[in-house]
């Protein structure tokens, strides 16, 4: 093998150069590949969310998250089935049928008058038995406006109308509990000097003075609301006390004395029947709810084409009174005909006439 000698006398060897360039190219390729892998790994690490779990490594790909937020791919239109609206009709509430109070009964009565003192003393039942009656009549509000019991109304206390005790009321409760007698309470209505003096519906003269009847007593008015409320409350208290019937006396306007000097006003209008009828209708309805009868006493003689000064016409009585009580001065047969003509039935038990000799009342 020959070669070129160098300056020291040695041959300088030059190996073969075939194939040496290819190895260098491979080396460069490997370096470039490693650089690409390194760059890809770095990008992978930065872009991909790697989560280490108990079951292994979980890779959260970014394009999977993006695709989750994309709207769904349009497809065939969906058929939306609309449920028809159902209208629920409200259930009608059926109101219960009100329980009507029983109609008051009108038995035949023989009513014997007793006093409040007899009630307090315990001799009232004996007095009725001695008089041959089956019913007791006692005055619980007199012509002076005084009461035989202690009312719970404020006006009674303000007027000083209450009794000193409640013994009469207690006696009535005991008789009612016993049930042996039919109990009737007499009530003087608008002939009440206590109301008149205290300007509760006071009836006045045309000259502007307080009007008095032939006995010097003042009157109140059926048209006055306060007076009507007061008397209504008293009647309801008597019903609760145990009376079977409330007998109203002077339940209208004055029909005796110098009635011609009475002034026309709100307390005494031109039409006397309207306020009287309204008052009786009210009290009658209130007592009917308690099963108690409302009766009206009258002594006014009714004659054709004659003014009814009290306002208690046959029509008013027939429409609002359970019974009509007549004193001796009233014509029983005439009233019977007038009341029958006004529509009142069962007059044999609903018309009570006073016996002049005995002072008792009979139907």
Image: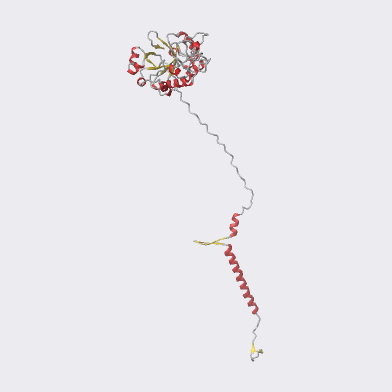
Image height check: is 292 above or below 307?
below
**Residue 285 visible within the image:** no
Tell me the quadrant of the picture where the N terminus can be found. bottom right
Q: How many numbered marks appear? A: 0
Q: Position of residue 191 (x, y in %)?
A: 44, 15
Q: Where is residue 338 in the image (x, y as percent from the top left)?
A: 49, 10
Decide which of 122, 69 is in the foreground and name it.
Answer: 122
Say how the picture is coloured.
secondary structure
Question: On the picture, is 255 further left or further right than 165?
Answer: right
Residue visible at 61% across and 69% down?
36
Tell me the quadrant of the picture where the C terminus can be found. top left
Decide which of 97, 251 is in the foreground and name it.
Answer: 251
Question: On the picture, is 215 further left or further right than 25?
Answer: left
Residue visible at 34% across and 16% down?
117
Q: Where is residue 41 in the image (x, y as percent from the top left)?
A: 58, 67
Q: Where is residue 308 in the image (x, y as percent from the top left)?
A: 50, 11
Question: On the picture, is 132 further left or further right than 258?
Answer: left
| Quarter occupied by residue 4 | bottom right
| Quarter occupied by residue 361 | top left
Residue visible at 62% across and 75% down?
27
Decide which of 11, 328 is in the foreground and name it.
Answer: 328
Q: Which residue lies furthest to the bottom in this view?
A: 9
Residue visible at 63% across and 77% down?
24
**Residue 259 visible within the image:** yes
């Amino acid at each position: 093998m020959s070669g070129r000698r160098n300056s020291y006398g040695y041959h300088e060897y030059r190996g073969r150069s075939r194939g040496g360039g290819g190895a260098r190219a491979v080396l460069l390729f490997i370096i470039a590949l490693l650089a690409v892998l390194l760059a890809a790994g770095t990008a992978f690490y930065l872009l991909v969310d790697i989560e280490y779990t108990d079951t292994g490594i979980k890779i959260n790909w970014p394009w999977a998250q993006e695709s989750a937020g994309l709207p769904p791919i349009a497809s065939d239109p969906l058929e939306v089935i609309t449920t028809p609206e159902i209208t629920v009709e409200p259930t009608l509430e059926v109101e219960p049928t009100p329980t009507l109070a029983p109609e008051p009964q009108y038995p035949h009565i023989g009513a014997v008058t007793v006093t409040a003192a007899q009630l307090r003393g315990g001799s009232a039942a004996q007095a009725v038995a001695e008089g041959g009656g089956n019913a007791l009549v006692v005055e619980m509000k007199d012509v002076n406006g005084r009461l035989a019991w202690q009312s719970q109304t404020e006006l009674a206390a303000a007027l000083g109308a209450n009794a000193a005790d409640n013994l009469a009321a207690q006696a009535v409760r005991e008789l009612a509990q016993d049930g042996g007698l039919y109990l009737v309470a007499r009530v003087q209505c608008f002939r009440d000097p206590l109301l008149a003096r205290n300007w509760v519906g006071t009836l006045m003269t045309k000259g502007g003075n307080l009007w008095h009847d032939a006995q010097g007593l003042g009157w109140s008015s059926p048209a006055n609301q306060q007076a009507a409320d007061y008397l209504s409350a008293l009647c309801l208290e008597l019903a609760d006390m145990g009376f079977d019937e409330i007998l109203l006396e002077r339940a209208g306007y004055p029909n005796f004395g110098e009635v011609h000097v009475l002034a026309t006003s709100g307390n005494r209008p031109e039409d006397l029947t309207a306020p009287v009828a309204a008052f009786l209708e009210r009290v009658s309805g209130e007592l009917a709810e308690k099963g108690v009868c409302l009766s009206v006493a009258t002594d006014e003689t009714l004659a054709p084409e004659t003014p009814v000064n009290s306002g208690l016409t046959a029509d008013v009585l027939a429409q609002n009174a359970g019974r009509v009580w007549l004193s001796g001065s009233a014509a029983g047969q005439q009233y019977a005909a007038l009341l029958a003509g006004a529509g009142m039935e069962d007059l044999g038990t609903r018309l009570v006439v006073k016996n002049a000799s005995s002072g008792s009342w009979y139907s």
